[in-house]
Image: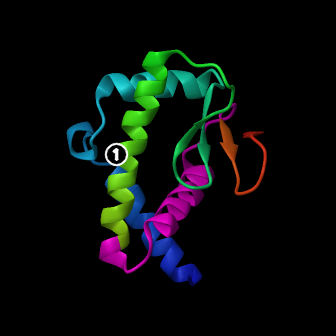
């Protein structure tokens, strides 16, 4: 995929992620739980565009919140991919690139492709 395509797909994904909670298929409680877990270093962003657990231990409610948000992201990546002529995997990777560059807060974790968790 060319750089210009990655940027346009990334921009499309980021625009879709900015939609209201109801439109992006995630509940406010799931978002709040994940945001708190990201701040605590329990959950981080992965190179595939999905959330993952930095630490192995998580309570069932947090696991459910992560699963809910990841399911919404999967739907979003499929929609963006179909509109932009790319694969959902490419859409997820483009979203990760945008999130890692512009949305991660200091102290939050991300995991690049094939790498270990890194703290920003």
Residue 92 on image: x %, y %: 49, 59
Instruction: In this rendered view, identify the residue nearer to me: 109 or 92.
Output: 92
In magenta, the rendered stretch is 82-108
98 horizontally vs 14: left or right: right
Residue 110, relative to residue 6: is it above or below? above
Q: What residue appears at the point 55 percent right and 23 percent down from the top-left corner?
A: 37
Residue 96 on image: x %, y %: 56, 55
Residue 98 within the segment the image draws in magenta = yes
Q: What residue appears at the point 67 percent right and 25 percent down from the top-left corner?
A: 56
| Mark 1 crowd level (few <14, some 14–19, many ≥20, 10 Å Cα) | some
Q: Quadrant of the N terminus?
A: bottom right
Q: Residue furthest bottom?
A: 2
Residue 31 position by quadrant:
top left
Magenta portion: prevailing SS class: helix
Residue 56, relative to residue 88: is it above or below? above
Residue 45 on image: x %, y %: 59, 43
Dot 1: what SS?
A: helix
Residue 105 on image: x %, y %: 61, 37
Q: What residue appears at the point 34 percent right and 66 percent down from the top-left corner?
A: 80
48 horizontally vs 110: left or right: left
Residue 19, relative to residue 14: is it above or below? above
Residue 37 within the segment the image draws in magenta = no
Say how many tags the image has: 1
Q: Residue furthest left?
A: 22
Residue 14, relative to residue 1: is it above or below? above
Report which residue position mark 1 lands on: 72
Instruction: In this rendered view, identify the residue nearer to me: 103 or 57.
Output: 57
Q: Quadrant of the C terminus?
A: top right
Residue 48 position by quadrant:
bottom right
Colouring mode (rainbow / by chain / secondary structure / one colour): rainbow
């Amino acid at each position: 995929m060319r750089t210009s395509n990655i940027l346009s797909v990334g921009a499309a994904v980021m625009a879709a992620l900015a939609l209201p909670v109801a439109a992006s298929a995630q509940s406010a409680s799931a978002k709040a739980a994940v945001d708190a877990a990201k701040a605590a270093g329990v959950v981080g962003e992965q190179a595939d565009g999905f959330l993952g657990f930095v630490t192995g231990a998580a309570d069932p409610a947090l696991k459910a919140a992560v699963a809910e948000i990841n399911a919404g992201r999967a739907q979003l990546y499929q929609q963006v991919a179909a509109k932009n002529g790319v694969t959902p995997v490419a859409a997820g990777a483009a979203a990760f690139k945008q999130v890692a560059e512009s949305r991660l807060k200091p102290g939050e974790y991300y995991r690049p492709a094939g790498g270990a968790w890194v703290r920003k």
